[in-house]
Amino acid sequence: MARLQDTSQRGGIDIRDLSMTYRRGREVTQALSACSLTIPEGGWASLIGASGCGKSTLLRILADIVQPSGGSATLGGMTPAEARATRSFALVSQQSVLLPWRRMLENVELGLEVARADRAERRRRAEEAIELVGLRGFERAYPHELSGGMRQRAAIARALTLRPRFLLMDEPFGALDELTRASLNFELLRILEETSATLLLVTHSIAEAIILSDVVAVMSPRPGRIVHKLEIGFGHHRTDAMRDDPAFAAHEAELRHALHGDPGVTRPAIREPAFA
Amino acid sequence: MSLTLSAGGAMAWRGAARVVPPALGLAALLAAWAVLTEAGIIAPYLLPKPSAVLAEILTNNEPLWRHGQLTAMEALLGFAIGNIVGVVVAVLMGWFPAFKRCVLPLALVTRGMPMVAITPILVLMLDRGLVPIVTVVSIAVYFPTLITMVRGLESADVEYHELLHSLSASRLQRLLIVELPAALPFLFTALKIGASIAFIVAITGEWVGASAGLGYLIVISGEYFKLAMMWSAIIVASGLTLVTLGCVMLVEKLLGRWTARGEGMA
């Protein structure tokens, strides 16, 4: 497991001029166009946009599931394929993708099982992760016996067992009700503070993007491109109270305008975050 | 009946609802058989009385036992070989798509061949007896298993494959962790089909290709007008099929609590 904590290769996520074109017969769909985004190591970024704007495509490129048509994407200096081979990132998607025939504990152990960690290590780390997401006592439950929120916690626990340097999350709470979603947002914050992972989150919730990010990138509908970047100045020790902060409402308004292509966005768009 | 049924009572009621109607149907069939034969409406040389068949099973069961054992062995051996070959070939097809494209059409062609017509050919090649019967049973059983398993191995949602891909899993890990467990309910469907096919094909195979077994006993008893023995053999053959089917269903129940529900819930 030593290579998972390799410190020689440092760095965040670097996306440069990424583009993606799908061809089906004569029909050509431009899913992504010249997307650039830099997330420093340990930083938290969100991609927000209407459904079908290509934000999932961007994440799938980083996860080495699809290959981009142009541009480059690196995680800690590695190509997505290298990052996948060294198990440097973990992917959490909207569907928890738990194997229905495995108990929750066995599902959480999956990543380590695939990485051929020994049994004791597997069990220890899985229990640690289960503790962290607050699922103690449900280890022996089958996925269909868990609520949607619990399944999603299990998926996050599974992602954490490999101690990934990069967490790629594709609408992880998109299928949950508002209340569960809000509480899981703050739980994820707590977990993120305990790990030092770099986060790239895809979401269509403005509030979720602000709560969980240092920088929010707004994407336009097809062809997906980043039209606006907003720095969230809340630091990394966040609490529920942040939602009552006037700055939160201001961020919310700005993102809402950017999302809806409102020409009356009063503040000039931040072209590049200060740290890029 | 009280309006508030306890859970146990409701379960017993549902159990009874599943057992009682077929039992009634069977009783009605036996009653009709008894009435028609005892009253002489159907002559005993066409259909023996149920009492005569029962007496035959109780008193003269040595040939039933001997031939039944042989048929059971042939059917179960063929069942095992056919299923193993079917599963292995399906896994190979999933692993090597080119192999699948070459072999699957051929497998579909063997499906069209009538098993009864194949037996004499197998007898010519392999001589009479156990070997050709086991072979023909294997051929008949392997096909539904192959087709069902090919579909079963493909049944897992693409999300599971993407998950394993993102975890950098090997091809073998994908097979063992996702594809095979997902195919398990499909396998049991195939096993249930195969269980009845195995006995039917073994018995028809024995008509042409053997000098022993229940199929042979049925033919010989018919030729000598030993109708009670013939019907006893038919009943034993159906009994063997049902027992095998029951075993498959029991294993399925013990093994797959998730197959009945929760499937597809991620």
Image: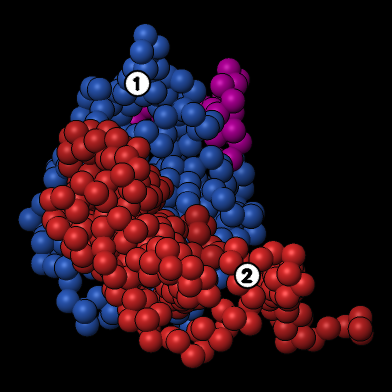
Q: Colour of chain B?
A: red
| Residue at horizontal 29 percent and vertical 75 percent from the top | B70
Which amino acid type is shown beneath numbered disc 1?
A: Tyr
| Residue at horizontal 60 percent and vertical 21 percent from the top | A262
The quarter of the displayed image where residue A189 is located: bottom left
Which amino acid type is shown beneath numbered disc 2?
A: Pro
Point out the image quarter for the N terminus of chain B: bottom right
Residue denoted by label 1: A22
**Which of these two is toward me, A63 or A192?**
A63
| Residue at horizontal 34 percent and vertical 17 percent from the top | A23
Q: Colour of chain A?
A: blue
Q: Position of residue B86 (x, y in %)?
A: 27, 54
- In this picture, which residue range is highlighted in magenta? A251-276
- Secondary element at tag 2: loop
| Callout 2 crowding tier (Cα within 10 Å): few <14, some 14–19, many ≥20 | some
In the picture, measured across the screen, residue A112 lies left or right of residue A209, that is: left
Residue denoted by label 2: B44
Question: Could you tell me if the residues under marks 1 and 2 are in contact, i.e. CB atoms within 8 Å?
Answer: no
- Secondary element at tag 1: strand
| Callout 1 crowding tier (Cα within 10 Å): few <14, some 14–19, many ≥20 | few
